[in-house]
Amino acid sequence: MTSAIGKPVTMRRGGFSLIEILLVLALMAIGGTVVMLNFTAFADRGEQNDAVEQLSKVVRKARFFAAQDRRETRMRFDSEGGRLLVERETFTLHAETLRPEFRGNGGASVTFLRVPSAEGLQSPPTPADAREVIPSVRFASDGSCTPFVAEIDTGSGTPRRLAFDPFSNLRKDLE
């Protein structure tokens, strides 16, 4: 083929060179490795926070049911079924099933501790001072609740203690 000025033009074939193909494959392998490492780290973190997230969800639901119906609700841990329950008088409004190790004698448990109230003009105690075990947490019709700390023991390592604000869904890790 010749150009408009009469010089021969060489045509290049379409396609990729071997170096270009190998470079793309290497970049794809590196990208896939990074994605897999991030995914496994995310999956591991999700298993650790599973009970914490479920507990936070149940606290929100208990507040919602109490405020919606303007009636007291209670939240408790059912160790036989491994469930967090939101109840009103004799019936269950919501049940959240935890992982299998929370059932029966699986070694994991959730315990609720009452945060002590201030006496006289003394400064209020911190949630870390909570020691009195309570069977359930009471949510009033305005959505507020008994000041409490939840202790989640997964059966491996130190139990995780979380303080919940009595008037909002904020939680604080005490560790």
Image (tube, helix red, strand yellow):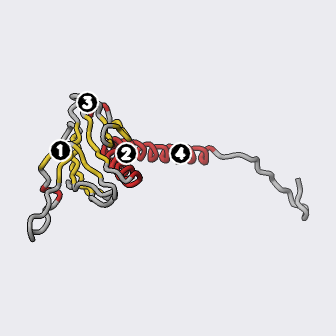
Q: What element carries label 1?
A: loop
Cα–Cα span, label 4 and label 1: 41 Å
Question: Looking at the image, do the residues carrying marks 3 and 2 touch, with CB atoms under 8 Å apart?
Answer: no
Cα–Cα span, label 2 and label 4: 20 Å
Crowding at label 4, few (<14), some or many (≥20) Cα neighbours within 10 Å?
few
* Residue 170 position (above or below residue 123): above
User: How many tags in the picture?
Assistant: 4
**Residue that numbered label 4 is attached to:** 28
The residue at 53%/45% (across/down) is 28
Cα–Cα span, label 3 and label 2: 31 Å
**Foreground residue, 77 or 151?**
77
Name the mark on residue 158. 1
**Foreground residue, 92 or 45?**
92
**Residue that numbered label 3 is attached to:** 80
Tag 1: residue type? Thr
Q: In which quarter of the view is residue 107 placed?
A: top left
The residue at 26%/50% (across/down) is 138
Q: Is mark 2 on a helix, strand or loop?
A: helix
Tag 2: residue type? Ala
Q: What element carries label 3?
A: loop
Left-right relation of 98 to 33:
left
Name the mark on residue 41. 2
Of badges 3 and 2, the one in the foreground is: 3
Left-right relation of 60 to 12:
left
Of badges 1 and 2, the one in the foreground is: 1
Tag 4: residue type? Met
Q: Is mark 4 on a helix, strand or loop?
A: helix
